[in-house]
Amino acid sequence: MPNLPPLLGLARFIDACNALFGKACAWLTVFLVIGTAIVVVLRYGFGIGATALQEAVLYAHALVFMGAAAWVLQRNGHVRVDIFYQKFSGRRQALVEIFGNLLFLLPVALFLGWASWDYVSNAWSTLEASSESGGLKFVYLQKSIILVLVISLVLQGISNLIKALYVFSGRLPAPEVKHG
């Protein structure tokens, strides 16, 4: 799109990055199903424990939910109480988005980042590993997924805020509200 305003270009770039990362994380659900099935067959069929695989499934589970959260937010896929929202004009919906991002999403995401910083940095300082015999040695990476959540949500919140400001100002058409 030629002559795209810089802030709108930034919002679209954030959207593209979060969509790419979210879709990649969503594909991990295939690994979750296969990995869980293998763990069950090994354990109950052959009496063999597979601690490393169990932990890998746990890591993937965390990444699916925390890694794809911003992409789901971008697509309006999170649960929202929109009894009134769906009846609002595009401009009023944009105002709700502006206040929702400024008063709820961004402060909560930033608080989560602040509250989890020591937890994650302590794991990195010791290169924390699994306490289970045969477990993975990358617990510090799993804990870092919390910060991936924070960063991606903050960036998506900024993108949503930029787009809502453009809609509110009349420089961008209001998106259709999708239900279902």
Image: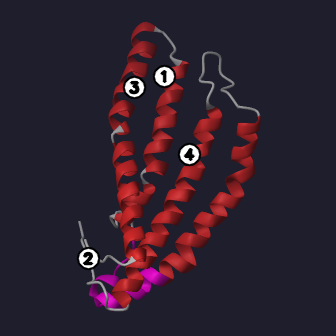
Badge 3: residue crowd in 10 Å (few <14, some 14–19, many ≥20): some
| Residue 89 lies in the magenta stretch | yes
The amino acid pointed to by label 2 is: Val
Q: Dot 2 corresponds to which residue?
A: 177
Q: Position of residue 80 (x, y in %)?
A: 39, 71
Residues marked 3 and 1 touching at CB (< 8 Å)? yes
Amino acid type at image mark 3: Gly
Q: Which residue is mark 3?
A: 35
Amino acid, disc 4: Ile
The residue carrying mark 1 is: 53
SS assignment at label 1 = helix
Task: First in sequence, mark 1 or 2: give its number.
Answer: 1
- Which residue in the protein does label 4 denote? 145
| Circle 2 or circle 4, nearest the eye | 4
Q: Secondary structure at mark 3?
A: helix
Viewer-closest of 40 and 29: 29
Instruction: Find residue 149 and name its label.
Output: none
Question: Do labels 2 and 3 touch, CB within 8 Å?
Answer: no
Residue at image location 71% in from the left, 52% down from the top: 117
Q: Residue furthest top?
A: 46
Marks 1 and 4, how far apart at CA: 18 Å
Mark 4 element type: helix
Position of residue 21 in the picture relative to residue 151 (left or right): left
Mark 1 or 4, closer to the camera: 4
- Residue under the point 42% across and 13% down: 42
Instruction: Please say if 3 is above or below 44.
Output: below
Residue displayed at 34% across by 63% down: 77
